[in-house]
Amino acid sequence: MDTSPIGKHLFSYKGKLYPNHIKQGNACKFIEPFALQLCKGEGLDIGGYAESILPGATAINVRLREEWDAYTLPDKKYDYIFSSHTLEHLPDYIKALQYWTEHLGSQGVLFLYLPHPDMEYWLPQNDRKHLHVFYPQAMEKVLRDLGFEYVLWSECDFYWSFVVVGILH
């Protein structure tokens, strides 16, 4: 058993050190405090879990074949759609984003938490479950092109992820 700091707190991947929590999933817990400030009212949490972390959200589990998934949502408008570390797993992420946008009401919020491209461990060539690489400024442009008037985005955080938030007018 490795009792060094490497085994206890860190792991090495391609010569770089990362915290072990990266391998544990549940990335949404790292962005939850910020998401709670913007995601209010009735919404969807589109991701991999059966329960949402956000009050007022219906969880849409994309890993299970249920009635609803990323491309088939209840036919109504929502105040927000939150998605953490999900978009990179979807074959057609533009189709999903367009579809999600159609399900937002006036002043609706689309909150995306995505793997940062600096994290080699999550690049598609290293993690075959990831189909896409996203860059913060490129995702800002995608949301603007989809009709979001107000877009906020961040750079890499300590979970090697970033946020992009679009708000409709």
Image (cartoon, helix red, strand yellow):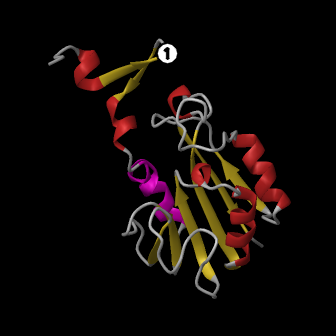
Q: Is residue 102 above or below residue 3?
A: below
Quadrant where the image shows the N terminus: top left
Magenta-highlighted residues: 27-38
Residue projecting furthest to the right: 145
Residue in front for this viewpoint, 72 or 43 = 72
Q: Residue at x 53, y 77 (%)?
A: 68
For label 1, the crowd category at 10 Å Cα-Cα, with few meaning under 14, some 14 to 19 and many 20 or more, is few
Return the x and y of residue 6 as percentages of the image width and height.
28, 17
Q: Is residue 31 above or below residue 158?
A: below
| Main SS category, magenta section | helix
Position of residue 65 in the picture relative to residue 6 (left or right): right
Position of residue 148 in the picture relative to residue 158 (left or right): right
Q: Residue at x 60, y 60 (%)?
A: 111
Q: Is residue 41 visible?
A: no
Indicate the quadrant where residue 96 lies: bottom right
Q: Say what amino acid the circle numbered 1 marks.
A: Lys
Return the x and y of residue 134 as percentages of the image width and height.
68, 42
Residue in front for this viewpoint, 82 or 59 = 59
Return the x and y of residue 125 as percentages of the image width and height.
60, 30
Q: Is residue 75 visible?
A: yes
Name the residue beneath numbered marker 1: 14
Quadrant where the image shows the C terminus: bottom right
Q: What element does badge 1 sit on?
A: loop
Q: Residue at x 42, y 48 (%)?
A: 27
Return the x and y of residue 80 as percentages of the image width and height.
59, 72
Count of numbered circles on the image: 1
Task: Inspect the magenta stretch and tell me whether residue 103 lies in it.
Answer: no
